[in-house]
Image: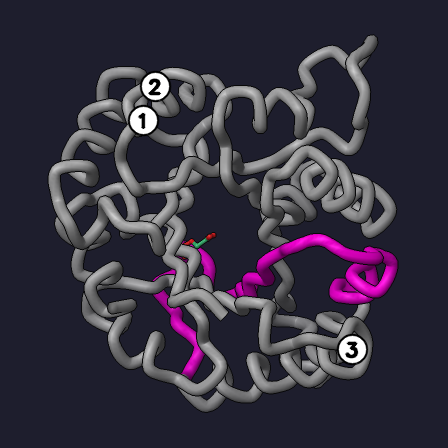
Amino acid sequence: MAGKLVIGNWKMNTRAQSAQALAAELLADAATNHEGVGIAAPAVYLAALAQQLKGGKLALSAQDVSCYAKDGAYTGETSAEMLADIGCVYTLVGHSERRQYFSEDNAALLAKMRNAIAAGVTPVLCVGETLAQREADEYKTVIADQLAILAEIADGEYVIAYEPVWAIGTGKVASLEQIAEIHAFIKNWCLQNVGASDKIRVLYGGSVKAENAAAILATKNVDGALVGGASLDAGSFRVICQAAG
Ligand code: PGA
């Protein structure tokens, strides 16, 4: 497996100028201008960022991709081929905010995964349980249901991100024991259902910050991090990327 991967998820933040300024800071720093680092920027800024990142090592990621593969009458959509066309290396798929606010279900997410892989964009499938599901002790069933689409994918590279919904943007980070438990569970699920689990990177996401990154990234089966809030600050993001080695 390649080294650890850290992706900064900017979500619906930045403007043209602040996005370019943040990217410039990341490009100027060897800790962030690194093969193992990506930025998932708002769709409207991707093309300009792709130009700016040219020649650098930092990978560009989209935050979402269309479930429709071919060009056509899908107003508002961005296809995987369009993302590949401008140089996106990754796209997030099924982030919990997409599942929650845009009712994305497994059928749509499987189509997104397939479209991304076919276009040569590596999808990062996000999975994770809500607080109610954790408290009801249903979290493993929920995560297995979300992972199930991977068994429908014959081949192609992808990344998985475990993001407990209750830890996203809340400052409430999962304990190292909770992280280790789920990452082992996901690796084991992959081994049993898709094989070759040693090639699939499993990132942790949910309130990863400069202060907790080293301990999280040193946890068994954690192959990187998906970072929201802290990725909007170059200084914090650099510390997290450094912790990934
Ligand atoms: P957070 O977001 O780091 O702000 O908790 C993580 C994510 O949603 O990817």
Q: State which region is magenta.
A: 146-175
Assign a secondary structure to mark 2: helix
On whether residue 154 falls in the magenta region, the answer is: yes
Density class for disc 2 (Cα within 10 Å; few <14, some 14-19, many ≥20) is: few
User: Are discs 2 and 3 less than 8 Å apart at CB?
Assistant: no
Please give the label number shown on residue 51.
2
- The Cα atoms of the two marked residues, 2 and 3, are separated by 42 Å
The residue at 59%/81% (across/down) is 182
- The Cα atoms of the two marked residues, 1 and 2, are separated by 5 Å
- Above or below, 198 against 85 in this view is below
The residue at 66%/48% (across/down) is 94
Foreground label between 2 and 3: 2
The image quadrant where one finds ligand 1 is: bottom left
Dot placed on the residue nearer the N-terminal end, 2 or 3 = 2
Q: Which residue is mark 1?
A: 54
Residue 173 appears at what percent x and percent y? 39, 72
Please give the label number shown on residue 141.
3
- Above or below, 112 against 126 in this view is above
Locate the C terminus and report the quarter of the image it occupies: bottom left
* Residue 103 makes an appearance in the image: no
Assign a secondary structure to mark 1: loop
In-image side of 182 versus 22 (left or right): right
Residue 202 appears at what percent x and percent y? 54, 69
The three-letter amino acid code for the residue at tag 1 is: Lys
Q: Which quadrant of the structure image shows residue 201?
A: bottom right
* Whether the residue under disc 2 has CB within 8 Å of ligand 1: no
Assign a secondary structure to mark 3: helix
The residue at 37%/62% (across/down) is 207
The three-letter amino acid code for the residue at tag 2 is: Gln
On whether residue 8 falls in the magenta region, the answer is: no
